[in-house]
Image (cartoon, coloured by chain):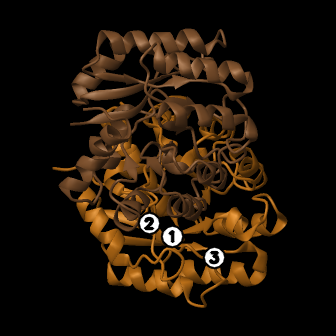
Amino acid sequence: MIIDGRVHLGEGLFGQRQTVTDLLERMDRLQIDRAILTPLRPQHYHLASENERVADAVRNRPDRFLGVCRVDPWQGADAVTELRRSVRDLGLRGVYLNPWEENFPINDEIVHPVVREAARLGVPVLINAGQVRVSHPTQVADLARQFPEVRFIAANGGNLNISGMLLSEARAMLDACPNVVIETSGTYREDFLEEVMAEVGPDRVVFASGTPYYDQEFEMERVRCAHLGEQEKMAMWSGTLRQLYQWD
Amino acid sequence: MSRQEIIDSHTHVDKVGWFDPPETIIRLLDEAKVDRAIIMTYVDAPGRTSDALEYIAESCARYPDRLIGYARMNPGYGQQAIDMFEHAIRHYGMKGLKLHPVSYLQHPASPQTVAIVQKAAELNTPVLFHCGDEELSLPLQIARLAELVPDARIILGHCGGYFHTKDAIRVAQRHANIYLETSAMPYPAMIRQAVESIGAHRVLYASDGPGCDPTIEVRKVRLAGLSPDEEHQLFFENIDSLLRLAGRKEAQP
């Protein structure tokens, strides 16, 4: 089974867009069985209706989709309320934080109420990681260490640096924080994913394309071409995600 | 020709840093069915090791049909670096200059960089830059060098990285001596956009292997939706033309 661990829906403020119809068509062509959906930041700036859009998609195709809400920690108590509503009323099963687009350092105290609520609800926290000023792997680790009971998923392999100079920090984050896994999305470099699987653990890397930021078809190649055994690849394709989101 | 020939324009071999002997890249090139690759060290010369250029020369000698050498230099050593670079071209048969400003901490348009790049232009060798999202390696910064040394053929490795691909395309539109290289950056659509904006003749396939897998990097180019002729230009023709000129004084651009 293949699960795409991060797919964004909607019409984004920053020019990206993706509809359920386009997505399902492509998933069928690429033989992706399921996807974890979360909103793009919309042009109208309001995340609540976008969380509802994700919930609708899940309601229509529960066999293919699981939903994760998106909240903006700058909204304070309203962000916590929206997370609770999304999980309890809309049936979403995680929370996505994008510190770059919502403009907050991921280890800032404003994030704590949201993470505490995720802990109460028992859902994982998906982070757009690797942005140097707001979600550097040291900052993600700083947050994750304070909430050892919460499971965190760091997008972009936990780092965005085409020199490879952040790989050691992404590795240090994984070594220090057993509650963090990384996504394959956009990673520099592929042998880092192989290293993490071998040396940190086979349950620490999950497939995610991050479409439409990244190309879903191309992102699959990172797992397909990895120099790993079949069992390890199955963990990357879906096993670890199913366990993280308790998705049978 | 039964199969499209492929040259990988940017890979690494070194005994320090990320330890990658030539056998590592050869194995990945075989898997990817890539015929030849340009190799360079992770360290600059002069620098951490006294024989970085010799290690590249020896690797190329061990696999003469597969590997082509570039000299990765630190322009901060002034005339010494220029002399070592010229020696590598004339006596080790190397074909190009690699510069990684984040490694040696100089602006790409610094006087010492201009001097060594002028030597590269004189020797007709391409200059491959690390070009990503970090200070000293931004496309608009490297463009200033392209303006100062219009005879140099300057390749923007990684095409601007994660966040500066559009800037890389912009500066290539403005400067005819800038080439774009596809390695590591994660967007097949940007390859197509580059070809549409500046033409297929100035875009080069590369992997940045062995860290980045040449098989995956070849696939990225194939997903860009280019014509067979355009693909052939990216995979082979463009870098082949640049390499044929290297070291030949008579053929100025």
Nearer to the camera, A31 or A199: A199
Which residue matches tag 2?
B38
Q: Quadrant of the C terminus of chain A?
A: top left
- Residue at horizontal 44 percent and vertical 42 percent from the top: A185
Disc 1 + disc 3, Cβ < 8 Å? no
Indicate left or right for B68 with B113 as reference.
left
Q: Which mark is residue B106?
A: none
Residue at image mark 1: B95
Between marks 3 and 2, how big is the CA–CA gap? Answer: 16 Å
Label 3 Cα crowd, 10 Å radius (few <14 / some 14-19 / many 20+):
many
Read off the residue under disc 3.
B44
Callouts 2 and 1 close, C-beta under 8 Å: yes
Please tell me in which quadrant of the rendered image residue B17 appears: bottom right
Chain that appears brown: A
Amino acid under label 1?
Answer: Lys
Residue B52: image location, x then y, percent: 55, 84
Name the residue located 73 percent from the left edge and 73 percent from the top edge. B75
Q: Position of residue B176 (x, y in %)?
A: 63, 42
- CA distance separating discs 1 and 3: 16 Å
Q: Say whether disc 1 or disc 3 marks the residue closer to the N-terminus.
A: 3
> For the residue labelled by badge 2, is the local secondary structure a helix, a strand or a loop?
strand
Name the front one of labels 3 and 2: 3
* Chain B colour in the picture: orange
